Image: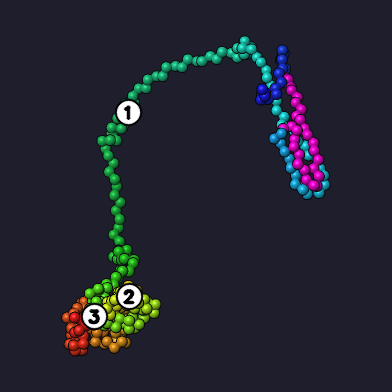
Amino acid sequence: MLDTTPPSVELEVDRLGVFIVTFTPKKELFDVTPQGCLYNAHISRYISVRFPKKASDKSFQCAIQEAATFTLKIDIDEETVRAYFRPEVIPEEPEPEKEKPNLDLLNSMTQKETTPVLPTIQKFKPLPPLVMERLMKPTRKPLIVDKESKCLSGKSLMNIAKMVPEGLTLAVHLDLPDSTITGLGFDAISNGLSMTDVTYKILLYWKRKIKDKNDGAIDRLTDALREMGRSDIATVVYERHKACKEMTPDAIGEVLTQRGTEGTSILT
């Protein structure tokens, strides 16, 4: 069975004094050359030292030394310990005295409770009117939200599409991208849409892209209608916008009366 207890030194002491135990630890020396070195220590098989090649320009000597540890064991009998230590004398604690109630303190507390202190209200001088006006003046400008023109509602755009079936031409004058115009054209052909439906989809796409959906949008739409030769429709759209009214079939009927029966076939 392997003994795992560390080595110890036992001393038999029969007199007083100072005792010194001297212990010489094991030590190993080995040489390291410029070609490197791999050394396994004899002190412990778990110790291995390695120096790579060209770690130094010349050979030198190294040493491995185990740590100096020792155990000092001194046995002292129980009678010696009792003779050395004197018994501890514990003094008796006096009984605590009962505190008498302080009547003066109780009287002062009752007086404070019966006489509450009223808070003092500090009076301020009234501010001048100019200062009050400056303080009450709002710092931010009022936010003005432009409402959408009624001529750009879904019903209005559908009625405009019935009067202007040339949707692709209108898309060019509204400066829509060529890719968008081409895509809408192929979509109309593949789905069998009518020209009125194509114009309505173009107007909805243009409405989503513009930011100003009030006067600026109406000006751009009427300009595009005039550029494609539909000044009559542009005039009706502008008048209905100023009157804050939608484009209805009755409003477009006035234009149809002026253009003849050609426009009537479109609405029907």
Left/right of residue 64 with respect to residue 117 in the rendered view: right
Q: Which residue is mark 3?
A: 162
Magenta segment: 18-44
Q: Is residue 189 magenta?
A: no
What whole-number distance in Å separates the C-alpha atoms at marks 1 and 3? 101 Å
Going from N to C along the chain, the mark reached first, 3 or 2, is 3
User: Where residue 13 appears, x then y in whole percent?
Assistant: 71, 15
Q: Amino acid at mark 1?
A: Asp
Q: Which residue is mark 2?
A: 190
Q: Quadrant of residue 106?
A: top left
Q: Amino acid at mark 2?
A: Ser
Tag 2 secondary structure? helix
How packed mark 3 is, by other alpha carbons closer than 10 Å (few <14, some 14-19, many 20 or more), is many
Q: Quadrant of the C terminus?
A: bottom left
User: Where residue 75 appears, x then y in whole percent?
Assistant: 66, 15
What whole-number distance in Å separates the C-alpha atoms at marks 3 and 2? 21 Å
Q: Which sits in the foreground, 8 or 172? A: 172
Tag 1 secondary structure? helix
Going from N to C along the chain, the mark reached first, 2 or 1, is 1
Q: Which residue is mark 1?
A: 104
The residue located at (70%, 22%) in the rendering is: 8
